Image (cartoon, rainbow, N blue to C red):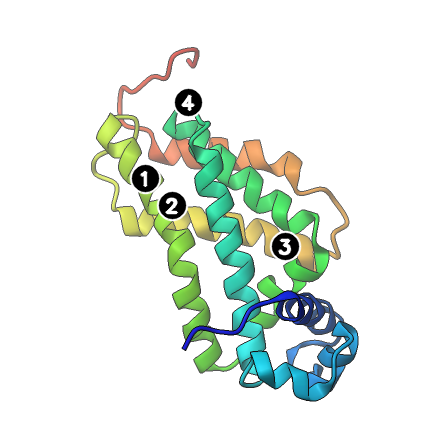
């Protein structure tokens, strides 16, 4: 059955991000989330089955909107290299501007039980599919090495971006993320380029 949507749904999602970031998942009672959202405790259960459902729905909503935004923006890119850089920049920008969301995605979602981790991996498939599409496009265009295993390189790309954000979170956001986008992109591109490939304007 489709989940009930509406203004209260969005308020509960946003409240959950704030409460879980401040208290940790295990100490974030449904009553705290309801209070932050300005709704009665019972209202929560009109939209969500339980606290786990709130957490997964929050990640699903945020990730779904993020993937849709990246896909729309990628149409503006002139090359596959630009698409990768655009994706990295948007990933870092999204989390840099929302410290609470960064705390939840980088820490709280990973300390949860196996059931939650499995559902998180399901939600991530859309984003990982975007990375796959960039790699495959680059291989078809001859820009990326044909010998690259797409699945392995996707893990490298996502893992590198993810670790940069996690390290930033662990260091209490003491520096800016965005200046790291281009150096990270340059590092990844060196591992992707096909032998003897040279993009116009590059040496």
Q: Are marks 3 and 1 in contact (CB under 8 Å)?
A: no
In the picture, the quarter occupied by the N terminus is bottom left
Query: From this viewpoint, which residue is outermost toward the bottom?
Result: 42
Relative height, residue 92 to residue 126 (above, below): above
Q: 104 or 188: nearer the eye?
A: 104
Rendering coords of residue 57 (x, y %): 53, 70
Q: Are marks 2 and 1 in contact (CB under 8 Å)?
A: yes
What residue does disc 3 label?
Answer: 167
Q: 87 or 148: nearer the eye?
A: 87
Return the disc, 2 or 3, that comes first in the chain's sequence. Answer: 2
Return the disc, 4 or 2, that comes first in the chain's sequence. Answer: 4
Q: Are marks 2 and 3 in contact (CB under 8 Å)?
A: no
What residue does disc 4 label?
Answer: 78
Q: Which mark is residue 126?
A: none
User: What residue is rendered at 55% in x and 69% in y?
Assistant: 5
Return the disc, 4 or 3, that comes first in the chain's sequence. Answer: 4
Q: Nearer the viewer, mark 2 or mark 3?
A: 2
Relative height, residue 47 to residue 17 (above, below): below
User: What residue is rendered at 60% in x and 52% in y?
Assistant: 165
Rendering coords of residue 185 (x, y %): 49, 34
Q: Which mark is residue 131?
A: 2
Classify 10 Å Cα crowding around label 2: few (below 14), some (14-19), many (20 and above): many
Question: SS of the residue at dot 2?
Answer: helix
Classify 10 Å Cα crowding around label 3: few (below 14), some (14-19), many (20 and above): few
Instruction: Work out how far the residue at label 2 is from the one at label 3, CA to CA, in angstroms.
Output: 21 Å
Question: SS of the residue at dot 3?
Answer: helix
Relative height, residue 132 to residue 39 (above, below): above
What residue does disc 1 label?
Answer: 135
Question: SS of the residue at dot 4?
Answer: loop
């Amino acid at each position: 059955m489709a989940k009930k949507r509406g203004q209260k749904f969005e308020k509960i999602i946003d409240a959950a991000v704030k409460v879980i970031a401040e208290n940790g998942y295990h100490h974030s009672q449904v009553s705290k989330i309801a209070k932050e959202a300005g709704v009665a405790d019972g209202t929560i259960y009109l939209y969500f089955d339980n606290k786990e459902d709130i957490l997964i729905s929050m990640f699903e909503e945020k990730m779904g909107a993020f993937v849709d935004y990246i896909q729309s923006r990628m149409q503006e890119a002139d090359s596959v290299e630009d698409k990768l850089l655009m994706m990295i920049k948007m990933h870092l920008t999204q989390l840099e501007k929302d410290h609470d969301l960064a705390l939840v995605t980088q820490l709280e979602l990973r300390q949860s039980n196996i059931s939650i981790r499995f559902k998180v991996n399901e939600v991530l498939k859309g984003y990982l599919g975007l990375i796959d599409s960039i790699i495959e496009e680059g291989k078809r265009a001859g820009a990326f090495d044909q010998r690259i295993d797409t699945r392995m390189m996707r893990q490298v790309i996502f893992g590198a971006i993810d670790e940069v954000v996690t390290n930033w979170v662990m260091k209490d956001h003491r520096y800016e993320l965005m200046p790291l986008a281009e150096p990270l992109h340059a590092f990844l591109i060196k591992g992707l380029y096909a032998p003897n490939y040279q993009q116009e304007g590059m040496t």
